[in-house]
Amino acid sequence: MKRFALTFLLTVVMELIVCSGLTDHAQAKVIEPEESDTVIISGGGGIFSPFQGKSGQSGSIQAMGLISPQERMGVELEYRNYKNELFHAKNIDTQSYILRGIGQYYFRSHGISPYVGLGVNIALNVFVEKDIEKKRDSINVKGDKGFGYGIMGLVGVEAPVGQGVALFVEGRVSADFLVTRYQNSSGNNKIGIENLSGLTGMVGIRFHF
């Protein structure tokens, strides 16, 4: 499934570049730095492939401001729905609600441009507690949710398709962790840290205001 996610991402990158190159007026309608306002709103969706689980859906909304013609900073809310290994119990249904501070650097200030980004986040992770205890009867998890934290890096390509509108495709790698309480077979209360890291392939649209 991870190979499928990477193939999907590469295919979309090529299609985006080709389609943008064939759009006669793309460069004419590109937002020049001196003409643009300061707010960019984005929405995207794709596939999240955890390192310790099965792939699922991912979606995000993002609000960013221009620091310079090639630098942006802002916030992002991402949602993931997938299966992950928790407490050595496999295929546990997991949903992650991630609030992330994010920055991006564009290698060109206009036109079709590759870019890189870095984000730091906190998260609320929800999982099926009973499924863990069915597979690990020595574990008693305290609740069905836990606090999370992480860091994310990305590479992407953005292409203008009209006045104030651009399409983008991104590949992301994230190091995410879940912190939750549980009770072991001896009855001792413990703090567990579980790995929720993985890869994401995402496509979406951006509006410049």
Image (cartoon, helix red, strand yellow):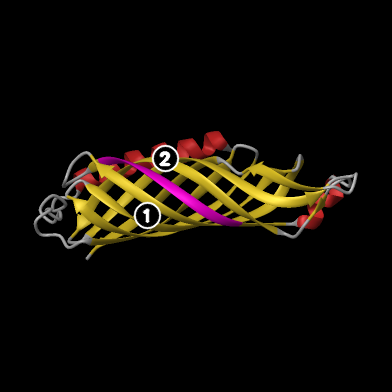
Q: Which of the pair 13/181 is nearer the observer? A: 181
Q: Which of the pair 148/18 is nearer the observer? A: 148
- The x, y position of residue 89, in whole percent, is 77, 43
Q: Which mark is residue 153?
A: 2
What crowding class fits label 1: few (fewer than 14 Cα within 10 Å), some (14-19), or many (20 or more)?
Answer: some
Q: In the picture provided, is 135 more to the left or to the right than 112?
A: right
- The x, y position of residue 206, in whole percent, is 30, 58
Q: In the picture provided, is 189 more to the left or to the right than 159?
A: right
116 falls in the magenta region: yes
98 falls in the magenta region: no
What crowding class fits label 2: few (fewer than 14 Cα within 10 Å), some (14-19), or many (20 or more)?
Answer: some
Q: Amino acid at mark 2?
A: Gly
Q: Which of disc 1 and disc 2 is earlier in sequence? A: 2
- Residue that protrudes farthest toward the top in the picture: 3
The magenta stretch spans which residues? 114-124
**Quadrant the N terminus occupies:** top right
Q: Which mark is residue 12?
A: none
Query: Which residue in the structure is indicated by mark 1?
Result: 204
Q: In the picture provided, is 58 more to the left or to the right than 34?
A: right
Q: In the picture provided, is 108 more to the left or to the right than 46?
A: left
Residue at image location 33% in from the left, 38% down from the top = 14
Question: What secondary structure is the magenta-colored segment mainly?
Answer: strand
- The x, y position of residue 62, in whole percent, is 37, 59
Residue at image location 26% in from the left, 55% down from the top = 166
Q: CA distance from mark 2 to mark 1?
A: 17 Å
Mark closer to the observer (2, 1): 2
Q: Amino acid at mark 1?
A: Gly
Quadrant housing residue 80: bottom right
- The x, y position of residue 84, in whole percent, is 67, 45
- Residue that protrudes farthest toward the front in the picture: 188
